[in-house]
Amino acid sequence: GRVYTEEIQFETRNFNPVLNLDSDGSTGNSPNYYGVAWEQTPLGALADDDLVLNDPDGDPITKMSIVLKVKSKSGYDALVYNSVHPEVLVSGLNSDSLIFEAQSHLPDSIWVDVLRNTYLLNSSEMPDTSTIRQIEIWIADSESQSETTTAFLRVKAVNDAPVCTTATL
């Protein structure tokens, strides 16, 4: 008789993690872009409420990078993280760059919470309303990195109501 053999080769594929700052397009932009004007308050959010973050092949997210690429000319802008997750190591607090690293396997919901609690802080009494701030964000698993997504934030000027104080004449 005859003997036939076949060699089968298997190739593993890794899919990049996915980060979408505005999944329903409510800000009128593409998934890799979030653009918003926030009123003259100290903190500007970096993502919409419908933020999506995951890894299609189920690998755990291990790292997130958030970098303030363009800030106001006045220099009063900084990235701040306003939460605590003991299993997430944070470096660069109140600066132009934040790096978050997992100390253990974390569900995607923790990473969503980390991003939702990271803000652009403007500490000026009269913030620069002409500069559009640009923040670049990416996530990674142990094998690959997502595409870089960009948040564009601009301070929208607000005419504060006058405040009446008691004066002595």
Image (cartoon, grey):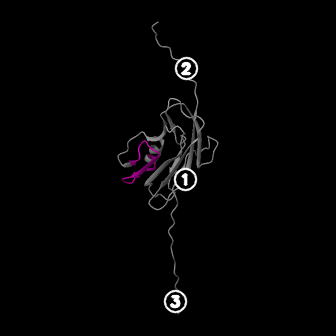
| Marks 1 and 3, the one that precedes in the sequence | 3
Outermost residue toward the top in this view: 169
Q: In this view, does 27 lie above or below 64?
A: above
Q: In this view, does 158 lie above or below 51?
A: above
Q: Are marks 1 and 3 in contact (CB under 8 Å)?
A: no
Whole-percent x, y for residue 167 in the image: 46, 10
Q: Are marks 2 and 3 in contact (CB under 8 Å)?
A: no
The answer to whether one can see residue 53 in this image is yes
Determine if the magenta segment contains residue 93.
Answer: yes
Q: In this view, does 10 lie above or below 98?
A: below
Q: Residue tagged by mark 1?
A: 148
| Marks 2 and 1, the one that precedes in the sequence | 1
Q: In percent of the image, x 58 and y 27: which residue is there?
A: 158
Q: What residue type is labelled 3?
A: Val
Q: Residue tagged by mark 2?
A: 161
Cα gap from disc 1 to disc 3, whole angstroms? 53 Å
Which region is colored magenta?
Answer: 90-109
**In the figure, residue 27 lies in which quadrant?**
top right
| Marks 2 and 3, the one that precedes in the sequence | 3
Q: Residue tagged by mark 3?
A: 3
Cα gap from disc 2 to disc 1, whole angstroms? 40 Å
Front one among 75 and 58: 75
Q: Which amino acid does label 1 sit on?
A: Thr
Whole-percent x, y for residue 20 in the image: 55, 49
Q: How crowded is mark 3: few (under 14 residues within 10 Å), some or many (20 or more)?
A: few
Query: Is 163 left, or right, of 82 in this rendering?
Result: right
Q: What element carries label 1?
A: loop
Whole-percent x, y for residue 61 in the image: 45, 54
